[in-house]
Image: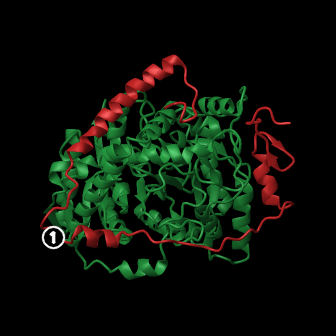
Chain colours: A green, B red
Amino acid sequence: MIDISKMGVKKIKEGLKAREFSCAEIVNLCLQNIESKNGEINAFLEVYDDVVAQAKKVDELISRGDFSGKLLGLPLAIKDNILIKGKRTSCSSKMLENHVAAYDSTAIKKLRKEGAVFLGRTNMDEFAMGSSTETSAFGVTRNPIDPTRVPGGSSGGSAAAVASNMAVAALGSDTAGSVRQPASLCGVVGLKTTYGAVSRYGLIAMGSSLDQIGPITKKVADAREIFSVIEGIDPMDSTTLSDDFRKGIRLPLSGKAKIGVPREFVSTGVDKDVVDNFNQTVNKLEKAGHEIIDIKLPTVKHALAAYYVIVPAEISANLARFDGVKYGLHRDGQTLLDDYLQSRAAGFGKETRRRIILGTYILSSGYYDAYYKKASDVRRVISREFYDVFNGKNKVDAIVTPTAPQPAFKIGGIVDPIAMYMQDIFTVFANIVGVPAISVPSGTVARDNVNLPVGFQVVAPHFREDTILDIGEEVESFSAF
Amino acid sequence: MAGLARIALTPEEKTNLQKDLEKILNYVSELKEVDTSEKPGATISDREFDSLSKPINVMRQDMNNLSSDDSSVKEILEGVPKKRDKYFSVKRILDNIK
């Protein structure tokens, strides 16, 4: 009997090699779980009709003795904003409900080449705008640990799929915490890669100066494997950086790390038991021999406000392409202008409209300096503070924080937009600065007699994914699951 | 603003949105407090820091790999809501043209 909940990249590959099971069997176990659980959880919006055929292809490779694929037979769930040629990709929006991708994203191409199997597309906040997957036009996703609660967001469907063993791993995208926060709320691992590490070609854009694709997995080891496949320079995304540059910057950690804790920042606006859980993990890291240093990042608390100027501005520009002419939903009006107005009103949900209109205002003549320029200046100040912490007299190797200020909250429990935005307070700065960050499960806190998972976040300088993956694995070894 | 953003709104939606936007703008106004001028005693100067993160131009060959009977053109056209032959079809924007 194969236990799919214990499966990972390495185990699957070894099992396939030893002919303990076939790829079809592994994929079937996922499909069975989807069949029995997805009705309630709503993690998948669509299960692809060619999953069995994809598995068969992998089994054919195996029968020919070809085990070269790094992710051979790995069943993956894909967030509904990452293009797979010939498949619907809707961004969980009415605007793109029937949109069929005309090309593969670079990440998908790379994963396919290494033998991964794509199970289907997962629910998300509409156009990745939200922290609960409640803004999806196709219903909320429920947290598998407590179905009355949200899975986090925006990659809530991907995190819920992995947490409920409907998939072994998943892809998400992270603009302010959209991979890490749902991973934290669902008790799985989420990696946000360095800005420029993974190509966004074929990722439907939200905030282009912030978006990154990242894996959601059960174990850190799998995040490492998937990252090693999807990273790399891509002529189709000019923000990706050359592998030479990456090699040059990666020096191995000398055994134990210097870990910075921004004490003041992590103790404000956080549930008490979440801070306690965080402190316990920090203590364990210290006991394990790492040096813990108190650090100050005086401006980091403003990262979220800067984000809510920068991201609506980028959204208003990126989402201008949805005009009912080139693709997506079309509503007929009296004039061409009317077509635009009606199509966009019918296609976009509440939060998406809110951010587009806010961005339009922020970028309008006369307000640019007060908002966008100021936010960009603050972004620079925050980036400098990180530079100083990583390169100044303390020279820390990593910074740690809780991933989210609270565990999974009730569906419909947060209505105020600002309160919802606050869910990203500990994750957003990594996007603002562009550095890599990982969320690893670090235990649970109880709410209404249910033990809900809490995540521990590790952040490192640009292109030091190796550091956060190493420390992440150590944190993983502390916790009971 | 909604007009500039090309989104039609009902009067009720306008009122609600106005309230939300006021809240958000009020929240982001905390940025005004942040001193963004150069601070003494930093590891490196603002100029040095900016030179580290200076954007560089990234170019690639601009090639047209498509021909009109290319399958990807067909695939793209399949997603177009209104088309005529291989063109997007939109309403006339200039009046009184014969």
Residue closest to the eye, A415 or A284:
A415
User: Which image quadrant for residue B3?
Assistant: top right
The residue positioned 33% from the left and 66% from the top of the image is A468
Coordinates of residue A316 in the picture (x, y in percent): 50, 43
Q: Is residue A290 visible?
A: yes
Count of all numbered marks drawn on residues in the image: 1
Identify residue for label 1.
A394
Coordinates of residue A15 in the picture (x, y in percent): 58, 68
Residue closest to the eye, A169 or A395:
A395
Residue A177 appears left or right of B83: left
**Residue farthest along the top direction in this orientation:** B12
The residue positioned 76% from the left and 35% from the top of the image is B91
Residue closest to the eye, B15 or A351:
B15
User: In what element is the residue under mark 1?
Assistant: loop
Q: Is residue B85 above or below residue A283?
A: above
User: Which image quadrant for residue B29?
Assistant: top left
> Which quadrant: the N terminus of chain A?
bottom right
The residue positioned 34% from the left and 44% from the top of the image is A371
Residue A149 appears left or right of A39: left
Coordinates of residue A196 in the picture (x, y in percent): 46, 66
Q: Is residue A247 above or below residue A36?
A: below
Coordinates of residue A327 in the picture (x, y in percent): 70, 44
Q: Chain of mark 1?
A: A
What amino acid is labelled 1 in the image? Asn
